[in-house]
DNA sequence: GTCTATATGATGATAGAC
DNA sequence: GTCTATCATCATATAGAC
């Protein structure tokens, strides 16, 4: 791992726990094992540019977890529930540390740091695109895929916060159950919602899962510590 | 409104937009229209204590919105969808300002400010208790009520962040749809989930709505600007 | 209670030796 | 490229006049 990555990784770790404003350059230098001046050599833009790199880095790492965790389940609904369960477990194991610096930094700096907000928006849009493609490949319609991605991301970010504050896994359980139920309702073609008409009746709902390779059980560590 | 409240309110407004670390005492003094020394006269604990008061104040104001927005709908499922729609509308109207300082501050300070985390946890637990009672009064079982409250709160906090970053109402639409569907599935007593057995079959599902008074259309401003 | 002035320390950023 | 020393500015908190 080269120095740039090491600095960005240390920044991501601090952003996750303290946010942007509370994270000092000197503290970052200590955490990254590099003197202050070195940071500015690698990132001319200083603190802001390092934070942007950290958001991009962790954003790219996070979206890889989606297929990694969902491919293991033939049923998408139980897969979603399991995803939230794993997130909860990992968060408890790490002492309820917030797992997503993107969420923390966005909430904190969207009005005061336009450049960081823009980077966060790009990361989120990538999440939506990649996730949407995945769910479409798993048999959902494009509109449903987009809805599910947005709902899953929102519920995850919110559950991070609730769980972080309350030190409880209950937000994850609740979010996983409701979203699992929603995905199951798409599969079962409820007649109770006549508003939702599906054009293509021949649509495959249990399309063959497009596994990359996924040999054994793809038990992935929830918090990515290395950049993809 | 007395001085204490005015100070706490100004703090809440700043926390919502900038978070805790980025909000300075002098900036707060300017916003509250009081000199620095006055803040310490009213709050001996300084910045931290003011922030705690702000979280409690807005937390109490927010939970009042739940019945205010849901009582207007006889059908709980459409009520939930409408709640998210209103939140989205109001957030867009305020220029995608984050609407919940509790979420922002929790994400930012849970690991570095134990006192603030504790206050945030208390606020969240109140939300869960009050919200749970409300949904039970609307006919849900106690377990279902708790699940719905946690899911709604998580989805709201997460949608705030996503919407704030992407400047889009789509997270709210997606969250509202999925949660509306979930609540509807509870009402319809799906046989597809045999695991969920309901003990009391005589349970009222459309219990008479316990309106406080709610005279006309309770169109409430989403962002509470005055303490309850 | 209100307000001014200030003490003490930390901040982001930079210059320049090696 | 690495590291040290330092600058100007900001922070929170307080003392004390009114």
Image (cartoon, coloured by chain):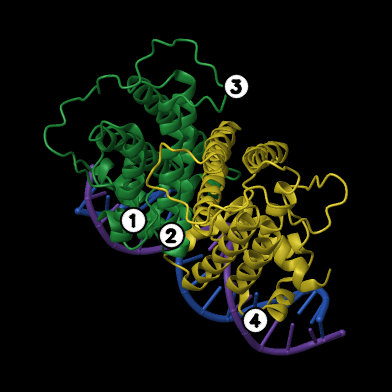
Chain colours: A green, B yellow, C blue, D purple
Q: Decide: marks 3, 4 in contact (CB < 8 A)?
A: no
If you read the primary sequence from the N terminus, does the residue marked by circle 2 or circle 3 appear first?
2
Circles 2 and 3 on the same chain: yes
The residue labelled by disc 2 is A164
The residue labelled by disc 4 is B44
The residue labelled by disc 1 is A91
If you read the primary sequence from the N terminus, does the residue marked by circle 2 or circle 1 appear first?
1
Quadrant assignment for the C terminus of chain A: top left
In the picture, measured across the screen, residue B75 lies left or right of residue A97, that is right
Q: Residue at x 41, y 36 (%)?
A: B192
Q: Nearer the viewer, mark 1 or mark 3?
A: 3
The residue labelled by disc 3 is A195
Q: Nearer the viewer, mark 3 or mark 4?
A: 3
Is label 3 in a helix, a strand or a loop? Answer: loop
Residue found at the far front of this picture: B202
Q: Nearer the viewer, mark 1 or mark 4?
A: 1
Instruction: Report how far apart the C-alphas of labels 1 and 3 lie in the structure.
Output: 38 Å
Q: Residue at x 62, y 75 (%)?
A: B46
Residue A221 visible from this viewpoint: yes
The subunit carrying tag 4 is B
The subunit carrying tag 1 is A
Q: Decide: marks 2, 1 in contact (CB < 8 A)?
A: yes
Instruction: Report how far apart the C-alphas of labels 4 and 2 lie in the structure.
Output: 28 Å
Of residue A103 and residue B19, the one placed in the foreground of this image is A103
Quadrant assignment for the N terminus of chain A: top left
């Amino acid at each position: 791992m080269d120095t740039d990555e090491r600095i960005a990784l240390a920044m991501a770790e601090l952003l996750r726990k303290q946010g942007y404003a509370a994270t000092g350059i000197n503290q970052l230098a200590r955490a990254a094992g590099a003197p202050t001046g070195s940071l500015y050599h690698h990132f001319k833009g200083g603190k802001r540019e390092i934070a942007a790199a950290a958001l991009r880095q962790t954003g790219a790492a996070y979206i890889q977890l989606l297929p990694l965790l969902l491919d293991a389940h033939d049923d998408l609904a139980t897969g979603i529930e399991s995803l939230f369960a794993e997130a909860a477990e990992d968060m408890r194991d790490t002492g309820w540390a917030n797992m997503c610096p993107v969420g923390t930094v966005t909430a904190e700096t969207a009005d005061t740091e336009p450049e960081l907000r823009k980077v966060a928006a790009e990361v989120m849009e990538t999440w939506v695109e990649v996730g949407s493609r995945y769910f479409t490949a798993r048999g959902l319609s494009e509109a449903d895929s987009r809805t599910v991605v947005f709902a899953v991301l929102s519920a995850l970010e919110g559950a991070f916060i609730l769980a972080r504050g309350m030190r409880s896994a209950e937000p994850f359980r609740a979010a996983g159950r409701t979203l699992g139920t929603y995905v199951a309702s798409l599969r079962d073609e409820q007649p109770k919602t006549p508003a939702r008409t599906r054009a293509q009746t021949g649509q495959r709902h249990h399309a063959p899962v497009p596994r990359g390779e996924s040999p054994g059980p793809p038990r992935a560590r929830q918090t990515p510590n290395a950049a993809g």
